[in-house]
Amino acid sequence: MNNSVTIDAGRDAPGGYKVDASRGERIGRVSSEWFNRPADERYLSLSELMASVQGRSERSRTRTVESAAIRVEASRDDAERLALVLPGADRPVAPTHWSFGQLAGIVGAPATYLRQLPAPLAGINLQYGLTAHRAEQVKTLEVENGRVELRAVTGPDYGRIYDHELVAAVQKIAGNGTGDTRWKIPGVLDWSTGIYNPRVDITSDTTTLYASDRDVFLFLVDDLNPIEAGRLPDGSPDLYFRGFYCWNSEVGAKTLGIASFYLRAVCQNRNLWGVEDFEEITIRHSKYAASRFAHQAAPTLTRFANSSPMPFVNGIRAAREKIVARSDDDRTEFLRKRGFSKADTAKIIETVLAEEGRKPASVFDFVQGITAVARDKPHQDARLDLEGKAKKLLDRAA
């Protein structure tokens, strides 16, 4: 990687460097994961995470069966116990909360209602649905975990990408994710000083490596090598670092996806601040999903990890240098021609004036104003619309 624009991480302050987190986009996806993950879904290293998801995969098996051939068993002695007997299986399997919902969905039964019934009664209803519903093939995913659990029930063409395959792809560029390579679990922004400290202890409170019985989610950054892309109004460097997050579900709960970006900071509750150049790809678990992962997603992650930041830096510089408005009429015309409402146009100009001490003149000025206004939008669609327009402006300037 070309490090010609990388600066010393400790140059600006002991234990960190000064950033302006008020600029760019704020993305809350990682924060949402951080907030909702219980302790047993948090991992302190990629090797620990890999051992968990790979071990689960090694204890798993799949089979394709006729839905009408599945037999439901319920215990009269235990009102909450329900099991399934699958064709070709030597013992019953216990459905998880997730797979029970998938099975109910296949036969058109309301899973929430069935879960409220005693197991014998729920079993009768589910068995009727399986028998009366048009017979079709389904693919099961079972795991041995003291007992045999049914983790997923999907269509026969479901293109499963296992969680350990995604983790392995990340390990190729990030090692253990704890600092043995340039890619690591992020540090923390101190809002009181504006100092971002990339070196923090990895604990269950700070980790960004997660996995449950339904999914896996990983977020890593290259924050020991900040990149200078221009200057702030006070003359100090505008610093960024690279980051990416990725996710997958091998049981059909969500797509596989990878998002890459440049950002200025990560705060304690794992919000991403000052995000620029956000790119995302997703892969549905369709018939050829495994091939797409091997030939598209994994190489994309490797290319981003090994790429030079110069195209990003040059794009930011070009946007800073491209003057598009010199008067109030120019500013209004520039935004209105690009589909901004009269109200948003006024807010964007006012925001730049308040934050920069001057009215917008360059493409970069307008982009910063647009993303700042987008952060205050209460509705996601409106926020994404503004952020999309800001990215288009930046891309065209580059």
Image (cartoon, helix red, strand yellow):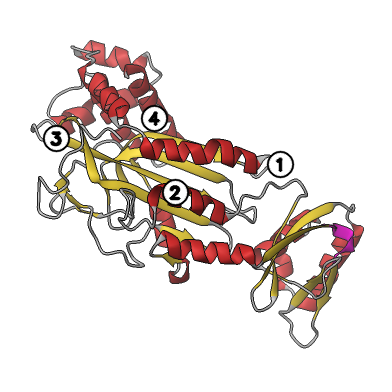
Q: CA distance from mark 1 to mark 2?
A: 26 Å
Quadrant where the image shows the C terminus = top left
The first of marks 1 and 4 along the sequence is 1
What is the x, y in percent for residue 77? 77, 88
Q: CA distance from mark 3 to mark 1?
A: 48 Å
Residue holding disc 1: 287
**Residue at point 36% right, 17% down?**
396
Highlighted range, magenta: 65-70
Q: Nearer the viewer, residue 369 or 142?
A: 142
The first of marks 4 and 2 along the sequence is 2
Q: Tell me the quarter of the picture where residue 22 sits.
A: top left
What is the x, y in percent for residue 158? 71, 47
The first of marks 3 and 1 along the sequence is 3
Residue holding disc 4: 386
The first of marks 4 and 3 along the sequence is 3
Q: CA distance from mark 4 to mark 2?
A: 36 Å
Q: Nearer the viewer, mark 2 or mark 3?
A: 2
Residue holding disc 2: 172
> Outermost residue toward the bottom?
77
What is the x, y in percent for residue 176? 38, 58
